[in-house]
Amino acid sequence: MDLLNSDNLKKKKGSGFTILSGDSTDGHGGYGAGVMNLDNISPVFVCPDDDEAFVDMGALHARSAVEKRIKFLPDKEKVPNGKLYWLVWVAIQYKESKPYYAGVAACEMTVDIEIRRGYKSMPEHVNHMDRALKGKIIVSQMDQKSKQILARFLKEHNEQMWEHSDKELHESLLSE
């Protein structure tokens, strides 16, 4: 049974980003102060083999359709036939009262459905999420095809947010 067939993924795919909502830490300094707010970050999966990108909010808790029923190993060599996915953390912020893609950080992940094993580096995933929240662009490790898929997805999702984003993001994803 193929757990990642296109029908299963289509059921799980979300179409929207989480855009900034009310901040429970609005300066009061009480309960919840200093807690990381994940309201403005979305996990985007890029699959170069399928030439697609999609949002799966389950990835915030390592429960995405791609990750379910897979035991992840820290050694890439133990999953030689894994299908490549990029989990890209996309943070949205506002400047000049307009939303834009502020932080984008990609993490490599491979999944082999047949053996129900995969590779990912949990420290990398956590650190890249944090860096995306801080407005960093980390996509240099991605292959060119995956960068193009991500750029197309971000632009098609919201062209105004794409246009309002920093030049660094455009150059990082579109330059060869």
Image: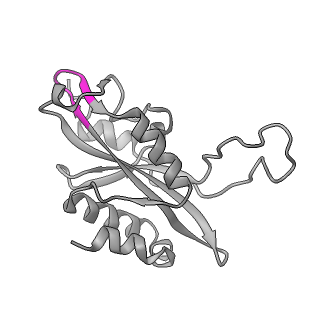
> Is 167 drawn above or below residue 124 in the view shown?
below
Q: Is residue 31 left or right of residue 129?
A: right
Total marks in image: 0
Quick check: is 165 in the magenta stretch? no
Q: Is residue 72 visible?
A: yes
- Name the image quarter holding the N terminus: top left
At horizontal 60% and vertical 46% (from top left) the residue drawn is 38
Q: Is residue 67 above or below residue 9?
A: above
- Residue 86 placed where, x, y %? 31, 47
Q: Position of residue 164 (x, y in %)?
A: 51, 77
Question: For residue 115, what is the image quadrant?
Answer: top left
x and y percentages locating residue 47 in the rendered image = 25, 49
- Percent x, y for residue 116? 23, 22
Specify whether residue 111 is painted magenta.
Answer: yes
- Decide if residue 16 is in sight here: no
Instruction: Identify the image's colour scheme: rainbow, by chain, secondary structure or one colour.
Output: one colour
Asked if residue 174 is positioned above or below residue 7 in the image, the reply reads: below
In-front residue for pair 162/72: 72
For residue 79, above or below residue 140: above
Q: 139 or 54, which lies in front?
A: 139
Tell me where the magenta segment starts and ends, as one range: 110-118
- The answer to whether 26 appears left or right of 36 in the picture is right
At 65% from the left and 43% from the top, the residue drawn is: 36
> Which of the 4 image quarters holds residue 79?
top left
Q: Quadrant of the C terminus?
A: bottom left
Residue at x 43% of width, y 77% of height: 167
